[in-house]
Image (cartoon, grey):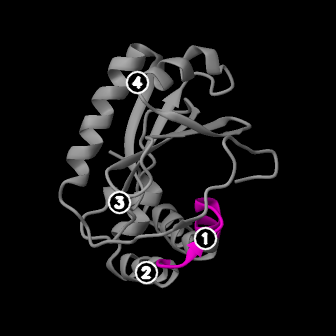
């Protein structure tokens, strides 16, 4: 979270639970995809399953991360009220980004990151990064090492992973540039 962010509802101390990959996570994403689509219709440009729950075999918090692309995240009136009505809670407001989540905080949760509509490709570089077996193991080990602690807020846990994520994404971006790989 950047310095311009507003955390709505205050900090939520919590213990982070990292569990082995659950084959039902893609189904959970599809449920949320349907709920978002019903709420927003053609006002949503893309809905992508991202984060660790989108990578087969990767241990993760049992929270399905979803990237939601809208025309203008700053124009909350065009989408946030409908997502609130669909059962999501607005948690973070920062420039060009809103984060909403389902009310639960432990299992079968979903977190929506609403961002500016920027292109037609999914956020593939970060997915590619965690698809590499060595990086996948490294990332899982870091997450498992951080799990089980009581964190002042989920954002503190996320910040503790920043360096390893930056290293993994850096390697993926270099590989992508060297091989001229682009998303299908």
CA distance separating discs 2 and 4: 32 Å
Confirm or deny contact between disc 2 and disc 3 (CB under 8 A): no
In the visual, does 121 lie left or right of 6?
A: left
Alpha carbons under labels 1 and 4: distance apart: 29 Å
The image shows residue 6 at horizontal and vertical percentages of: 75, 42
Q: Is residue 95 left or right of residue 115?
A: right
Of callouts 1 and 4, the N-terminal one: 4
Q: Which of marks 2 and 3 is nearer the N terminus?
A: 3
Question: Which numbered mark, 2 or 4, is in the foreground of this view?
Answer: 4
Against 51, residue 130 (above or below) is: below
Q: Do the residues labelled 1 and 3 touch (CB within 8 Å)?
A: no
Q: Do the residues labelled 1 and 4 touch (CB within 8 Å)?
A: no
Q: With respect to residue 24, does 19 lie above or below?
A: below
Which element is circle 2 on?
Answer: helix
Q: Answer with the quarter of the image where residue 61 lies.
A: bottom left
Q: As drawn, is 42 to the left or to the right of 84? A: left
Q: Name the residue under label 3.
A: 62
| Disc 2 from disc 3: Cα separation | 13 Å
For mark 2, what is the residue?
Answer: 144
What is the span of residues highlighted in magenta in the rendered image?
147-159
What whole-number distance in Å separates the C-alpha atoms at marks 1 and 2? Answer: 14 Å
Residue 140 picture location, percent across and down: 40, 78
* Residue named by callout 1: 151
Q: Which mark is residue 86?
A: 4
Specify the farthest residue to the right: 3
């Amino acid at each position: 979270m950047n310095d311009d962010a507003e955390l709505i509802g205050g900090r939520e101390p919590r213990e982070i639970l990292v569990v082995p990959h659950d084959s039902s996570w893609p189904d959970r994403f599809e449920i949320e995809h349907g709920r978002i689509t019903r709420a927003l219709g053609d006002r949503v440009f893309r809905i992508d399953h991202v984060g660790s729950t989108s990578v087969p075999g990767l241990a993760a918090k049992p929270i399905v991360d979803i990237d939601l692309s809208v025309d203008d995240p700053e124009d909350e009136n065009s989408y946030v009220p409908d997502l609130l009505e669909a059962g999501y809670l607005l948690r973070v407001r920062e420039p060009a980004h809103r984060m909403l989540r389902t009310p639960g905080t432990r299992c079968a949760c979903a977190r929506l990151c609403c961002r500016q509509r920027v292109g037609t490709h999914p956020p593939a570089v970060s997915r590619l990064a965690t698809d590499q077996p060595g990086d996948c193991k490294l990332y899982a080990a870091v997450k498992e090492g951080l799990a089980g602690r009581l964190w002042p807020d989920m954002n503190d846990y996320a910040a503790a992973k920043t360096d390893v994520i930056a290293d993994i994404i850096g390697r993926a971006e270099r590989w992508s540039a060297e091989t001229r790989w682009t998303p299908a």
